[in-house]
Image (cartoon, rainbow, N blue to C red):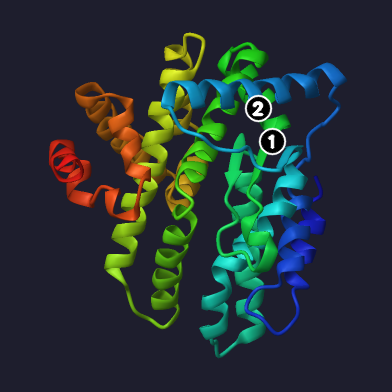
Amino acid sequence: MNLFRSVRAVTDASGDGTVDWDAVAEAAKASTRPGTLDLSAADRDAYASDVRDARERLQTVGDVRFDLPRVVEIQNRHHWIETNVTTFERVMRPIERHGESAFPEAARVINTGSMAFLLAFLGRHVLGQYDPLLLADGDDADEHSLYFVHPNIVRVADSLGVALPRFRRWIAFHEVAHAAEFGAAPWLSGYIESRMKRGVEALATGGLDREAFEELDAAMTAVEGYAELLMDRAFDEEYRDLREKLDARRQGGGPLARLVRRLLGLGLKRRQYERGAAFFRHVADERGLAAASAVWEQPENLPTDAELDAPERWLARVSA
C-alpha cells in the first residue's frame, strides 16, 4: 500500500473528461493492499466444486435452469478494482457527458479522488460478485461473470470465527443464486439497464426520474430477496449463525466505515435484502417455491413497491 502514490495519481489527474479513470484505478490500487492469491490446486478445486454444487442444488431446489457464467475468477483486491473501474465508468458516462464546471481541472481531481476512494473501499470489503455486465457494449454485453475476492473471504471468515471452507461455500451459493435469476430471466439485464439509463440521464441533466428509480429499487429488491430465499433453501449446511454474524458485520465497523456505507447506499442494499427476503418467504410459505419463481417469467411479474410490503396482493395479481 502506497498512500503517497495514491494521492499523486489523483492530483496528477488529466485528460478531457470529468474523471481520469486511469488515475482512479492507479490511486485505488495504490491505497489498497492486494492480498495474497497463493492458492493450492486443492484450494482452486474447492472453489470450482462449491460453484458446481451450488448450481446443481439451486437448479434442483428452485426448479430453475441456468448456465454458469463463462468467466469465473478468483481475484485479489487489485484484480477486482481493475475489473470494476470499467463498470463505474459506464455508469458515470451520461453524467460525464453533461458535466460542466467553471474549474474543470479542479473538478477532475475531486471527481477522480472520490471515485478512487469508493473503489478502494469496496475492493477491501466485497466478498463475491455476480456481474451481469450492465451497460456493456457489443459482444461483452452477453458475457456475464462471477468473481470471488479471496483475500476478503479469508479475512472475514477469520474475523467471524467461521471455518473458511464453510464460509466460502456459503458465499458461492449466494453468488450462484444471482446467476440463477439472470439465467432464468434473460430480460432482466435489459430491464435494469433501461431504468439505470433513464435515472442517470435525468440526474445528468438536473432532473429526477422518480418512476425509473422506484422501478429499479423494486427490481433490485426482488433480485436480492429471491437470491436470499433460494440460497437459504438450497444451502446444504446449517447457516443461521452465518446469517447472524454477517448481519452484525453489515451494521458494525467504525464511524468512518458506517458513514461510507451510508454514502455508498449499502444500507439501502441491506434493506433490499431484508425486504425482498421477507416478501419471497411469505410467497414461498403460502404457495411454494415455484410460485416465488414466477417472478422471473416476464417483467410484468416483478412486484411493485407497494406489493413488496403486501405479498398477498402480488399473489392475487400474478396468480389470477
For the point 60% across and 46% down, the residue is 122
Q: Give the residue pinned by disc 1.
A: 149
Residue at the spot 42% in from the left edge and 60% down from the top edge? 191
- Give the alpha-carbon distance from disc 2 to disc 1, as whole Å: 6 Å
Between 129 and 9, the one nearer to me in the picture: 129
User: In this rendering, does residue 94 appear at all?
Assistant: yes
Q: Secondary structure at mark 2?
A: helix
- Residue 180 bears which disc, if any? none
Res 192 → quadrant: bottom left
Q: Are marks 2 and 1 in contact (CB under 8 Å)?
A: yes
Toward which corner of the image does residue 86 lie, by quadrant? bottom right
Q: Position of residue 146 (x, y in %)?
A: 65, 40
Q: Position of residue 16 (x, y in %)?
A: 70, 85
Residue type highlighted by circle 2: Ile
Instruction: State left or right for residue 308 relative to residue 254.
Output: left
Instruction: Say which amino acid is labelled 1.
Output: Val
Residue 106 x %, y %: 64, 80
Query: Split into 4 quadrants, where in the image is the N terminus?
Result: top right
In this image, 282 relative to 81: left or right?
left
Q: Which quadrant of the rendered structure holds the C terminus?
A: top left
Q: Which residue is mark 2?
A: 153
Up the image or down, 226 lies above or below 297; here it is: above
- Of residues 133 and 149, the one nearer the viewer is 133
Residue 153 to residue 268: above or below: above
